[in-house]
Amino acid sequence: MKKLFKLILNGIPRPLLIRLSYYISPLLAFSMRGTKHTDPIDGRQFKSFLPYGYESPRENVLSPSTLSLERHRLLWLYLKKETDFFRSPYKVLHFAPEQAFYKRFRKLKNLDYTTTDLNSPLADVKADICDLPFDDSSYDIILCNHVLEHIPDDIQAMQELYRTLKPGGWGIFQIPQDLKRDITFEDDTITDKKERAKIFGQYDHVRIYGRDYFDKLRSVGFEVKEVDYTSILSAEEVEKYRLAKGELIPLVRKPAF
């Protein structure tokens, strides 16, 4: 099954894959129902999750119902239990909206919710993250997860995120993490897609972020907390929800001047 998923991910363009998944996921969810693992986003239980990954697929990580991965379920739990995201009135900008969240966030009456991306069929506004069409200090919350590793000029993108966020506003900017690295690795001379997938983990990634990612965010003005949310959950919860133990949530805030 891992080989099949690898072929699908690498062979079908992402916008088309998103559209097809709406038809396929209900069938997968029905066939894999059980009691061992729970997707906290919709509460459904399964005997296992699906494999996922472009280069080296990970076993038991993709929820058959919401199509959430470890990072999505971690973010959902954090937003639900540690913030007032689902209760208070906020103006929210969501980059490359994930299917697991899109319809659920759209239905929240407390949110003034806008999605943006260059290619996603779920984007309200087609926009380049390095040159955003939004006014300064427009949004209370920005969600920008697994986007910056695709962007050649990530500092420019971070500056645009900072500009667009309101003073006192906050955001979560998740990225693929290699916490064993002190320094981010990038090499723009590697252009072959297969080689990129082998080195960066995905054919359209341009870097592997190390621990200096958090300092990059600080360099453009953000206050940053490296939230190890799995450390306050039990081992049983981490396994039940199939989270990545030790994954850090990059919580940023724009200082209130």
Image (cartoon, grey):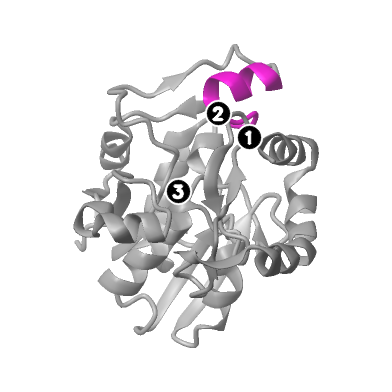
Inspect the image, locate mark 2, and give the three-letter code of the amino acid beneath it: Gly
Q: Is residue 69 left or right of residue 220?
A: right
Residue at horizontal 33 percent and vertical 45 percent from the top: 247
67 shown above or below 195? below
Most foreground residue, 192 or 246: 246
CA distance for labels 3 and 2:
26 Å
The label nearer to you, 3 versus 1, is: 1
Q: Quadrant of the C terminus?
A: bottom left
Label of residue 201 in the image: 2
Q: Which residue is mark 1?
A: 54
- The magenta segment is 193-206
Q: Are marks 3 and 2 in contact (CB under 8 Å)?
A: no
- Where is the N terminus found, in terms of image quarters? top right
Q: Determine the residue positioned at 37% across, 30% down.
A: 178
Q: Could you tell me the amino acid type at mark 1?
A: Tyr
- Answer left or right for 255 relative to 14: left
What mark, if any, has residue 160 been given in the picture?
3
SS under mark 2: loop
Reply above or below: 22 against 202.
below
